Amino acid sequence: MHQLLKQLRELMEGQPWHRPTMRGKRSERDEVERTSADLGIPLDKLHAAVKKAKLGTLSTKHWSKLTNSESYKATPTKARRIAKKYDKDLPGILHRFKNKISTAVPIVLHRKGEQPYLVAGNTRLAVASGEGIRPKVLHVRMKK
């Protein structure tokens, strides 16, 4: 019954999403390590928070406040520029969205007293914005 409700919810919400992986070819491991170094967060603590993180919809409030993302209110043209700037696979992302193929969620870090911080997924968020898709993200919550 739980699986049926999950499938129904995904059909109603449109794009299916899944947790990002920390191993393999499409891993977000490098982005997590970069965030650890950039923000001075011990890598083991960030990894632990990512493991405990929950999937959820990205609210307009949080999306508009992401300190390091160009994705909020992105148009299809802006999404193409972002993909080119970061050498990302725009055709692959568009293919997954247009064909309702499950896509790894972007990762957003929430820390008390700080603006939300995008760990990974700027291009996916920009494409979602340009396509009118309300994205799911992995909400990573940490104390300061």
Image: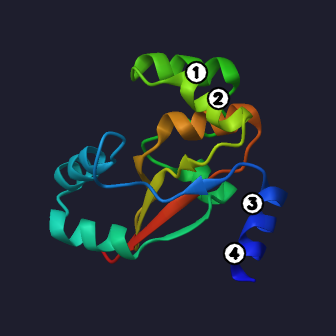
User: Tag 1, which secondary structure?
Assistant: helix
Q: Earlier in the sequence, mark 2 or mark 4?
A: 4
| Residue 36 image-quadrant placement | bottom left
- Amino acid type of the residue tagged 1 in the rendering: Pro
| Residue 101 image-quadrant placement | top right
Residue 42 appears at what percent x and percent y? 15, 65
Given contact means CB atoms under 8 Å apart, are the residues at marks 2 and 1 in contact?
yes
- Amino acid type of the residue tagged 4 in the rendering: Gln
Given contact means CB atoms under 8 Å apart, are the residues at marks 2 and 4 in contact?
no
Q: Earlier in the sequence, mark 3 or mark 2?
A: 3
Q: In the figure, is residue 56 to the left or right of 32?
A: right
- Amino acid type of the residue tagged 2 in the rendering: His
Of circles 2 and 4, the one toward us is 4
User: Tag 3, which secondary structure?
Assistant: helix
Residue 70 visible in the snapshot: no
Q: Which residue is mark 4?
A: 3
Residue 123, compared with residue 15, is above or below; it is above
Q: Quadrant location of the C terminus? A: bottom left
Q: Which mark is residue 95?
A: 2
Q: CA distance from mark 4 to mark 1?
A: 30 Å
Which residue sits at x=65%, y=51%? Answer: 135
Q: In the figure, is residue 103 to the left or right of 21?
A: right
Q: Which residue is mark 3?
A: 10
Which residue sits at x=72%, y=71%? Answer: 6
